[in-house]
Amino acid sequence: MMKVIECDRLTTSYGKTNALNNLSFVIEEHTITGLIGRNGAGKTTLLKTLAGFYMHTSGKLQVFGEHPFNSLKVSANLIFIDDGMIFPPSLTLWEILEASKNFYPNWDHELAERLFTYFGFHKQQSHQVLSKGMRSTFNMIIGLCARCPLTIFDEPTTGMDSSVRKDFYRALLKDYLKHPRTVILSSHLLNELEDILEDVLLIHNGQQKIHLSISDLKQYALGLTGTTAAIDELLGSVDILYTEQLGVNTKYVVVRNQLSETTLHKLKLNGVDISAVATDDLCVYLTNRHKGGIDDVFN
């Protein structure tokens, strides 16, 4: 498969602060990647650097084989959707769709009209007066129907209610299956996205934590619940990602899924319950400053 994005030790700095710090990853064509991280993790900076809005400070960056900053090739094959999109105030929503038909070569106007009607927009409405959720929904229509080879959604569901978010994810998946392209979705709501994602790139404080397929992420860790003595005795030097004291003598820990069959068998014999770890919880644990989370404040 063709490599759409190649980053090698990518760093973007503002003054003395590294918003992105030494990122190295590859995103191939025809994949949906979730860019996950807490607020302030560097997600928007990364996406705007990939889109050519920002010049990176050091490292190597290639998008469609070119440096994206001031690249006509990258601009012609990419659309960037976020809640800060601005359209000419003189145009109605319907006129924006009509103009888009002439601007994006892969534009599907029939789909745009159906989505416009489905979500209850009116032809004479102005983008500037829409609620935050309705603006995000309209922006989503533009992003879907443009069908650009690289489509970037930065926190696309801001302000949307739950039912509209579900409709958006469903619409994106259905259109992607018919018209594959490279899609990047940034969010901190991984639990809503995991059914449509193929890969997850988790960043924290501008640094890459993991870049895995969603199936590998689901197998990345195990949750163990049992007596404190039983868990502490058998785990030893195991990589512990999170720990929580559930009672006087009961503990829950999340560990890397690298335990031997012998260790797992001993844990079960000692009454330790072994469970899967939800992907959104795992991302929180991987980006916690403390392995005990907020509980560490009270210790």
Image: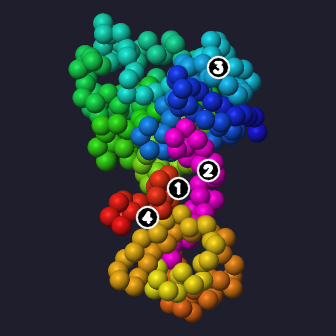
Residue 58 versus residue 269 in the image, above or below: above
Which amino acid, by three-letter code, is at mark 1?
A: Leu
Which residue in the structure is indicated by mark 2?
210
In depth, the one of 136 and 18 nearer the eye is 18
Q: In whole angstroms, how far apart are the C-alphas of marks 2 and 4?
A: 20 Å
Given this view, does label 2 or label 4 mark the residue nearer the observer? Answer: 4
Mark 4 secondary-structure assignment: loop
Mark 2 secondary-structure assignment: strand
Is residue 213 one of those drawn in magenta?
yes
Mark 3 secondary-structure assignment: loop
Outermost residue on the bottom side: it is: 269
Which residue in the structure is indicated by mark 3?
68
Mark 1 secondary-structure assignment: helix
Label 4 crowd (10 A; few <14 / some 14-19 / many >=20): some
Q: Are discs 1 and 4 less than 8 Å apart at CB?
A: no
On residue 292, the disc is 4
Q: In whole angstroms, how far apart are the C-alphas of marks 3 and 2?
A: 24 Å
> Looking at the image, is mark 1 or mark 4 earlier in the sequence?
1
Residue 211 versus residue 137 in the image, above or below: below
Which amino acid, by three-letter code, is at mark 2?
A: Ile
Give, as a single range, the part of the protein colored magenta.
202-224
